[in-house]
Structures are given as C-alpha cells and as structure tokens.
Image (tube, grey):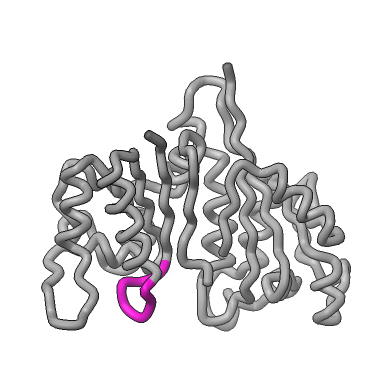
Amino acid sequence: MAKLTIGCFSSLVGSMSLDFAVKLAETAVEKGHEVDFWMSGNATMLSKKGQKSFKDYSYLDKRIRAAMDKGMNMCACEACAEARGYHKEDTFDHPKFIRKSMDWYLASCHTADRVLHIGGE
Amino acid sequence: MAKTTKMAFLVQRAGYKCENPKLALTHAISSQSVEIYLEDGDSVVPVVAFVGEGVLNCKNNQKAMEVYGITSTENHLQNSLLCDLKVLVCKEDLARFGLTESDMPDASAMGADTSIQVVPWETIHAELKGADHLLFF
C-alpha cells in the first residue's frame, strides 16, 4: 500500500474540485492506502462543522468523517481558516483533524508516494 | 540516509479573481520551516515556475497595498527571493505579453542574493522533469 497526499484549495461552493478530491481520498482509503488530505485557501470551508444535507447540494461532512474514522489524516491551513472565520471551535472535532501551517503539507508530500494537488484549474 | 524532495510549483494562471499565485508562493516559502516535521538531514527543495498567463504575476511596481490594502504578489515574490528560492519565468510567454526581464520584480535592494530567472521553456521543462512532485496553481 502507498501513501497519497491530496491537496485542495477550491471552495465547497462553486466548484466540484473539492468533491472530486474527497471522492478520490475516500476511494484510496477504502483500498487501504494511507491518505493525507490538505486544505488551503477556500477549501478550508470543508472543515466547517455543522454542515447539513440538502437535496442536490454538495454534502461532504459525513463522507469526510467516515474517511477519517478509517484513518485518513485531514489538515486545514490554520491561517486560511482563521481568515475566513473558521475558528478552532467552528471546525471538525475529530482526532484525525488538525489545523497547521503549509509546511505540514510539504512535509506530507516529502513522505508521500504520490501527490495530487487539485484545484488549480 | 537523508532524503531530499524536489517540489515544482507551476503557476499558470494570472492573479485575477483567484489567489492561486499567492498560494503557490506561500506554500513554496513554507519549505523554509518544513524541517520541524522531517527526519534529520531531510529537506524539501522548491522551485517556482511561472508559465502561460501565470507570467502576468511577475510585474514590478505593483500597488496592491496602496489600492487594496493587501500584500502584492510582487511582495510575495520578493519574499521568495529573500528566502533564496529558485523562481523561473518562461521567456517565451513573457515575450507574448510584451514583457521583458526589466519588468520583473526584484529584491536586491532588500538584500536578496538571488533574482528571478527568465529562462526558455526548455529550462523549465527540465526542472519539471527533475521534480519529485508537481503542483499546479
């Protein structure tokens, strides 16, 4: 099994890149790979807790939590989140979720077999 | 055995209506502090390359602070140079937009030892081929 680092900086609204990144991440986790998931910029929106499911709206909260339950590490850029008003108390309360600075992402890339940086389109 | 990971940050978008170029530069700059997470002797070496419309980020005399009250991409480029990051700009794409090497941001007055390198696409391509990971912004 390999280690996959996925980075994403597209928002949860107005782009399907984050949905794609999550789908890829959960598929990799299901296959038994180690996955680190990094969010910066607008993608930190995904770390907001209290997301609700509405028909035809993107709803990734439950899937992300399931992936973390299976071992996925999820990290949001702390500065990007704070700048958007997503403070620690507003974000996921899960042992596999952390908030760090960008060097965490580079360190994850350093030990990854593959890096997929999604959202630059 | 110490391991070095080379990461190429490829900026191909102009800095309008997106923060991609700044995210590329700040991520690359964070290589300066990544050692706290790594094994002794390991390192991450970034190279930042501007191609296509991305070269439009590399214009000097930006007034982002005066007009919008935000740090300009030029300032981020200068910070990159102060950190001795390798910053490449595609010569052919630059010419396509009527820009020259004299338009490039510079940080020598701030004490930087390095400057932006305007190079042919072939050189950038060689850098990308030599990188362990490519990150497109």
Residue A60: image x %, image y %? 22, 65
Residue A83: image x %, image y %? 35, 65
Q: Which quadrant of the view contains residue A45?
A: bottom left
| Nearer the observer, A80 or A47 | A47
Which residue is drawn at the image coordinates 31% and 60% (left, top)?
A23
| Magenta segment, prevailing SS (helix, strand or loop) | loop
Q: Which residues are magenta?
A: A10-16
B85, above or below B104, in the image: above
Residue A117: image x %, image y %? 48, 56
Q: Looking at the image, can residue B78 be seen?
A: yes
Which residue is drawn at the image coordinates 12% and 74% (left, top)?
A53
- Residue A11: within the magenta? yes
Image quadrant occupied by the C terminus of chain B: bottom right
| Position of residue B136 in the picture relative to residue A14 (left or right) | right
Q: Looking at the image, can residue B118 be seen?
A: no
Which residue is drawn at the image coordinates 40% and 59% (left, top)?
A40
B47, above or below B12, in the image: above
| Position of residue B109 in the picture relative to residue B13 (left or right) | right
A117, above or below A111, in the image: below
Seen as rendered, the residue at the extreme front is: A31
Q: Count the numbered circles shown.
A: 0
| Nearer the observer, B78 or B24 | B24
Image quadrant occupied by the N terminus of chain B: top right
Q: Which quadrant of the view contains residue A32?
A: top left
- Residue B10: within the magenta? no
Which residue is drawn at the image coordinates 11% and 72% (left, top)?
A52
Residue B12: image x %, image y %? 65, 69
